[in-house]
Image (cartoon, helix red, strand yellow):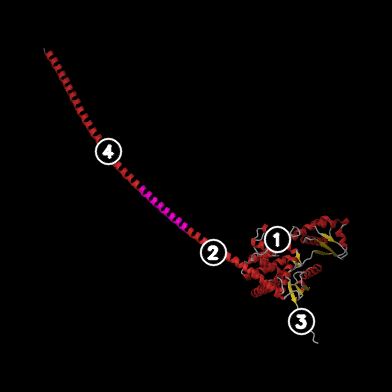
Amino acid sequence: MEVCLLSMDLWLAIVLIVVAFAGAFVLGVTYRKKVAEREIVSAEEEAKRIINEAIKSAESKKREALVEAKEEIHKNRSEYEREEKARRADLQKQERRLQQKEENLDRKTDALERKTETLNHKIAAAEAQQEEIALIKKSQLEMLEKVSGYTVEEAKAYMINALKDEVTHEMAVKVKEIEAQAKDEAEERAREIIVTAIQRCAADHASEVTVSVVPLPNDEMKGRIIGREGRNIRSIETLTGCDLIIDDTPEAITVSSFDPVRREVARLALEKLIADGRIHPARIEEMVAKAQREVNATIKAEGERAVFETNIHGVNQEIVKLLGRMKYRTSYGQNVLQHSIEVSHIAGLIAAELGVDVNTAKRAGLLHDIGKAIDHEVEGSHVSIGVDIAKKYKESEAVIHAIEAHHGDVEPRTVVACIVQAADAISASRPGARRENIENYVKRLEKLEEISKSFPGIAGSYAIQAGREIRVMVKPEEVSEDQMVLLARDIAKKIEEELTYPGQIKVHVLRETKAVEYAK
């Protein structure tokens, strides 16, 4: 019984537990359902809220976009209206200009038509007047021919001759006026500058000839120099490039060569051989080499001396050597190196007086005859050779032009070139600086007189003052006083073109008028 009660209690407990669990389950489910419903409602509300906010935000952005679009449209419309207004204004301006041009063209056309009509009337009147004038002129010419006794052609010739004489006179007077004015303004100053330069410049001059004479202790030495079968003299001539002239001149041998350096080498070698006494081919070769070294050393020393004496810096060593070679070169008996140094000094002094670059003038003066150092080796004049040398060793354009123009081969374009010309003439024309042989001197004088006599109306011409002055006598009945001025200039110009001479030549044209009458 108790067991049954216990079983029933147990089952009752179990049933109660199951019922409790079922009730709890139902309550849990109900609670979860309510919670879920609340979450769903909350989610729906949140979704609605989000949707509402999105709608509001979209509407706000839509309104902003509409506002921006309206503003952009308004801005574009305003710009378009401004551009359109500007285009309309430009078109209006162009239309006004075109209208003005059309009006101007119309006015000009009208004016041209009126001028054309006026000109046509004037042309017609002028043609009528021209015909009338021609008739009057013809009648007057006929009357003048009858009165004067001259034909038209004769009258023209008379008028031309009269006009020619008048023009000649006026031209001669003008030339005299210009020359007098130039002399008044320039002669005194030029004389002052030149005299100052000459007075301040003093240079020693040495003269050499184209042959060198070597003295001998006795005539027996001639045979030793010739040697057996001429071996010695052939060796000397071959090694030096000079000719040995052994003639009847007692105790002397003449060395001849166009190259002054070779001639000096041969002279020194002969002097050394004569002093040594041992003359044979091997010794000759040794002495020639020694003499060559001595001459080269002398050339370098003389070039450096010239550069130092003129105070010129930055001269290429090859040019220094060429300057030294000019110690053995002469021109009309004047030593070319000393002449170049003198020209450099004079050019520097003249440049200082004129306010020109002294260094450039002195450099151009020193190098103006540099071509003479090798003119016996290179084809061409010493001027062209000197220009090539100056260009080769990078001398300045002013120096190159002065070298090119110092003999008038080209027209001088710079003051330095003119200064070098003047300094060269001063140095060359100094009394005693240059000399020439009697044959060339006589030929030059004869040519000078011949040139003067080649002009019409010349009675005689006489070269005086050692050819530095020419006096020309003209026929008074053929050459007038006015024509004398032009004749003197023509003679001087022809002398410059056809003659080569140192310094300058003065042309005197003389005209003598005589009146002769006899008392009876």
| Residue type highlighted by circle 4 | Ile
Mark 4, residue position:
55
Distance CA(mark 1)–CA(mark 3): 58 Å
**Left or right of 250 on screen, residue 125:** left
Q: Disc 1 to disc 4, how far (Cα)?
A: 104 Å
Q: Quadrant of the C terminus?
A: bottom right
Q: Amino acid at mark 2?
A: Thr
Q: Residues within 10 Å of mark 2 (few under 14, many from 20)?
A: few
Mark 1 lies on residue: 386
- Quote the CA–CA distance across marks 3 and 2: 67 Å
Residue 147 or residue 275, whichever sits in front: 147
**Classed neighbour count for the residue bearing mark 4: other residues with Cα under 10 Å, few (<14), some (14–19), many (≥20):** few
**Residue 203's x, y, as percent?**
71, 70
- Residue 158 vs residue 409, the one in the foreground: 158
Between the residue at mark 2 and the residue at mark 4, the CA separation in whole angstroms equals: 92 Å
Estimate the x, y position of residue 439 in percent, counting from the top left: 81, 68
Task: Kindly identify which numbered label has been placed on residue 461.
Answer: none
Identify the magenta region: 76-103
Rendering quarter of residue 70: top left
Mark 3 is surrounded, within 10 Å at the Cα level, by few (under 14), some (14 to 19) or many (20 or more) other residues, namely: few
In the rendered structure, which disc, 1 or 2, sits on the residue that comes first in sequence? 2
Q: Nearer the viewer, mark 1 or mark 4?
A: 4
Per the image, is 94 magenta?
yes
Q: Are marks 3 and 4 in contact (CB under 8 Å)?
A: no
Tell which tag, 1 or 2, sits nearer the viewer: 2
* Residue in view at x 81 percent, y 59 percent: 242
Pointer 3 residue: 515
